Amino acid sequence: MGRPDTQIPLELSPEPASGFDSFIVTDSNRIAVTALRAWPDWPAPTFLLLGPEGTGKTHLGEAWKELSCGIFIDDAEKSEEAELFAQMNLALNGDVSGLLLTSRKSLADWQVQMPDLKSRLSSTPVMVMDDYDESDLEPLLRQLFENRGRQVTKDLVDYLLKYESREVGALRNLVRRLDEAALAEKADLTKYFAAQYLSGRLERDLFSGPVE
């Protein structure tokens, strides 16, 4: 006696591409992308990229690192100050091919204590990325599905954007959950499947079979 066996999904999705070519360029990030791709013709060996969570700073950082073989420090405001100062000196002395820092916080909110580090940071070129515009969300959501090896229909994309959170981090998590659920059921990821899953009906159906 017991529940029917439940399919455990295997993670067969391709690794999300991390290069510049797989990044969705929009009006909110075009200048930043252009500046990063302009390496090594930077005005300084260190560059600071600021922007809210979910705007793609990590993706761009990894893409730049792949291009330049330089040092990339994500969430740089969390770094130990002496270590960050040492990394900046490596870049300024030409010992590395470049240094890219990213952060969600403006420099004024880093609360840097080391005077020399504060001086270095204040002279670092800064590029700010904005939140995605409304018109950017559909191609972004499609890209998230494509990163997991799925081509989805417009009615599914429209449905998710209408009824689910439109915050980028939430959309990324939603795509992962839907992909794993469809893998577990060996089902196509359609609007109907998503609606069943998100309403909880699919989960109930999975465990409501007859007890043997």
Image (tube, rainbow, N blue to C red):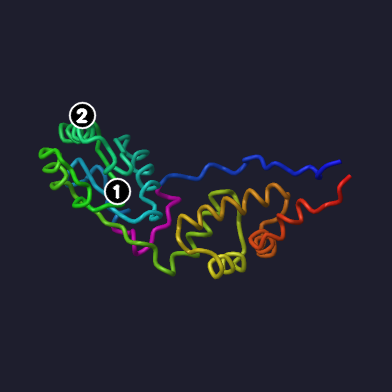
Q: Which segment is the magenta one?
A: 20-31
Quadrant location of residue 1?
A: top right
**In-front residue for pair 3/175:** 3
179 shown above or below 76: below
106 shown above or below 6: below
The residue under the point 62% across, 54% down is 178
Q: Amino acid at mark 1?
A: Ser
Q: Report crowding for label 2: few under 14, some 14 to 19, many 20 or more residues within 10 A (C-alpha).
A: few
Residue on which disc 1 sits = 103
143 relative to 7 in the view: left or right:
left
**SS for dot 2:** loop
Residue on which disc 2 sits = 95
Query: Where in the figure is residue 110, as x and y percent of width and height?
Result: 22, 47
Q: Nearer the viewer, mark 2 or mark 1?
A: 1
The residue under the point 50% across, 65% down is 138
Q: Amino acid at mark 2?
A: Asp
207 shown above or below 76: below
- As for residue 95 lying within the magenta part, the answer is no
Query: Where in the figure is residue 41, as x and y percent of width and height?
Result: 22, 45
